[in-house]
Amino acid sequence: MAQMVRDFDWRRPGTFLPVAMAASFKTKTFFSQMDNRGDLIAPLMFLAWVHLLGSLAALIAGFPITAVAWGFITRLVVDLIFIGLVYTIGHHIMRNPLNAGGFLRVVCYCLGIKIVAVILPFLAGYQDALMVLVYVYFFVTLYFGLRAAAGFTFLQSATCVLLSVVGMVLLMSLISSFTVSVPIQGPAGASAPGLGQPK
């Protein structure tokens, strides 16, 4: 029986899929034996790969390159904000000793389930439902990943995940309300050309 991979090595792309599969489907075992080297590059490169594969699938499906690039950047930024919330709540507020590299690995590797996004461009009408399932599954694996890697209790892990989700929803709502309430205007007060409703 092959030994389970212990960490993602960005210099060896072949470790990507084994890490994504182990974190998604053997969560407790993987994170309890995960090799936390403390560096931030490996999990960040892993997360970039996840979104890059989804973006490549969208290009193959015929989506405009500008829309794909914007989607890639947006999803990456949103995930990084969520990671920051999990780390802040787990390490600084809940005083868990797991370092930044450890928290980053848990969240990024659990996000590996998002490679399901590679089939989304080809499933017209089912994308929203599938993504809801993916996110629910992600939160469940994140709960078990935090318990295994950080040693959280049932209540601590559930609280960390729940507070991070609530914080993310509130933050996105705040950003959304701000962008809606502040119109984009030119120097003379007129709306800037090309920035109105999409055609």
Image: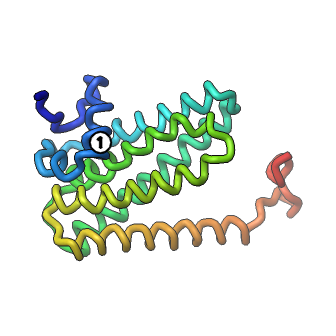
Horizontal placement of 179 versus 104: left or right? right
Q: Residue at x 51, y 34 (%)?
A: 118
For the residue pair 1 and 39, the one nearer the viewer reads as 1
**Figure quadrant of residue 84:** bottom left
Q: Residue at x 51, y 69 (%)?
A: 169
Tally of numbered tags: 1
Please say if 11 is above or below 100.
Answer: above
| Residue 104 rendering spot, x and y as whole percentages | 28, 51
Please say if 102 is above or below 46.
Answer: below
For the residue pair 175 and 15, the one nearer the viewer reads as 15
| Residue 119 rendering spot, x and y as whole percentages | 54, 35
For the residue pair 5 and 190, the one nearer the viewer reads as 5
Q: Residues within 10 Å of mark 1 (few under 14, many from 20)?
A: many
For the residue pair 37 and 51, the one nearer the viewer reads as 51
Q: Quadrant of the N terminus?
A: top left
**Figure quadrant of residue 81:** bottom left
Q: Residue at x 57, y 39 (%)?
A: 120
Name the amino acid type tagged 1: Pro
Residue identified by numbered label 1: 43
Q: How is the image coloured?
A: rainbow
| Residue 51 rendering spot, x and y as whole percentages | 47, 38
Horizontal placement of 82 versus 103: left or right? right
Q: Residue at x 39, y 44 (%)?
A: 113
Horizontal placement of 12 versus 47: left or right? left
Q: Residue furthest front?
A: 1
| Residue 90 rendering spot, x and y as whole percentages | 25, 67
Determine whether the residue tagged by mark 1 lies in a helix, strand or loop: helix
